[in-house]
């Protein structure tokens, strides 16, 4: 398994690879713009050129782009629904410009909509985005913890969305382990992991799985509260992650950590812990 972190773009894209290498990353994930706002500026060609060159000179792959937090495509009743689709289109295009084969998106909140309406809204938005962007960027739906009115916390909900996507060859899954645990899938022990993997495979298909978000959970199994924590220090624990990252159905996948940080030291600690769990 290739390990990495979500890397801040503070200071520009030219600094991203350097930050990733300091942390010992083999893969990386980043935003292409402010994750907590709608505004965006066109990508600076010089910054993009420098980013491409630094990635080529590194051993970092694959590269993942993550959509900002504000877009919500799970409710057509939201006044931001059209703007959210626009946002996906923009980042599909920016992913291609930056040489990132994958764009990760949060599935969203249904708000006052029914589950069925939300499933239809997400699928329609994805189809619209693919139709408008018209490039080869792969879109990964990230499972949720089921907090509030979130959908996508059950594998069955994600299956229904995928079935309605027209470009089947460009849709896949980013499985956030903390979110899955918080939604009720037990990744803290061998038996729970085997059952969860079997459920995923039978419902969605392991062939759809392209990335793991390796986050421990600060809240208990089934809490439906999204709280990431340091590897081995949460309710999933070291035994859960040890079995998970060495599992023959998963150990070929990249694993990105989105663990809490104030400085580089926390990332270095989490990287050391996760690597210590690899079977010799």
Image: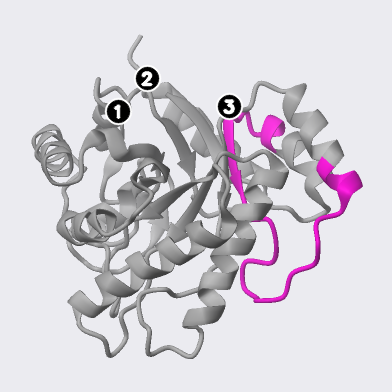
Which residue lies at the image location 27% right of the left edge and 31% below the top edge? 244
Q: Which mark is residue 278?
A: 2
Q: Nearer the viewer, residue 275 or 81?
A: 81
In magenta, the rendered stretch is 20-48
The residue positioned farthest toward the top in the image shown: 280
In the rendered image, the vertical position of residue 227 relative to residue 250, given as above or below: below
* Left or right: 238 in relation to 13: left
> Mark 3 or mark 2: which is in front?
3
Q: Identify the main secondary structure in magenta.
A: loop
| Residue 118 included in the magenta stretch of the image | no
From this viewpoint, is residue 49 visible? yes
Q: Are marks 3 and 1 in contact (CB under 8 Å)?
A: no
In the rendered image, the vertical position of residue 75 relative to residue 169, given as above or below: below
Of labels 3 and 1, earlier in sequence is: 3
List x then y, in percent, for residue 277: 36, 24
- The residue indicated by pointer 1 is 250
* Left or right: 207 in relation to 92: left
Splitting the image into 4 quarters, where does residue 255 fall? top left
Residue at mark 1 to residue at mark 2: CA–CA distance:
13 Å
Which residue lies at the image location 74% right of the left edge and 69% below the top edge? 40
Of labels 1 and 2, earlier in sequence is: 1
């Amino acid at each position: 398994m290739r390990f990495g972190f979500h890397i801040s773009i503070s200071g520009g894209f030219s600094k991203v690879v350097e930050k990733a290498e300091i942390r010992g990353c083999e893969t990386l994930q980043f935003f292409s713009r402010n994750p907590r706002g709608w505004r965006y500026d066109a990508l600076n060609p010089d910054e993009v050129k420098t980013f491409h060159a630094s990635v080529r000179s590194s051993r970092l792959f694959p590269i993942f782009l993550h959509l900002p937090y504000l877009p919500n495509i799970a409710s057509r009743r939201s006044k931001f629904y059209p703007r959210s689709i626009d946002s996906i289109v923009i980042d599909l295009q920016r992913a291609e410009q930056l040489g990132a084969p994958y764009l990760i998106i949060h599935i969203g909140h249904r708000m006052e909509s029914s589950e069925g309406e939300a499933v239809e809204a997400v699928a329609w938005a994805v189809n619209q985005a693919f139709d408008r962007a018209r490039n080869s960027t792969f879109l990964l739906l990230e499972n949720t913890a089921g907090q509030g009115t979130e959908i996508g916390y059950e594998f069955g909900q994600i299956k229904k969305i995928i079935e309605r996507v027209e470009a089947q060859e460009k849709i896949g899954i980013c499985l956030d382990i903390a979110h899955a645990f918080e939604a009720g899938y037990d990744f803290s022990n061998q038996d729970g992991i085997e059952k969860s993997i079997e459920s995923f495979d039978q419902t969605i298909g392991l062939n759809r799985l392209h990335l793991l978000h390796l986050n421990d959970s600060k809240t208990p199994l089934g809490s439906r509260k999204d709280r990431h924590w340091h590897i081995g220090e949460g309710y999933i624990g070291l035994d859960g992650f040890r079995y998970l990252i060495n599992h023959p159905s998963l150990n070929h996948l990249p694993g990105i950590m989105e663990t809490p940080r104030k400085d580089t030291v926390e990332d270095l600690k989490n990287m050391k812990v996760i690597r210590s769990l690899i079977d010799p």
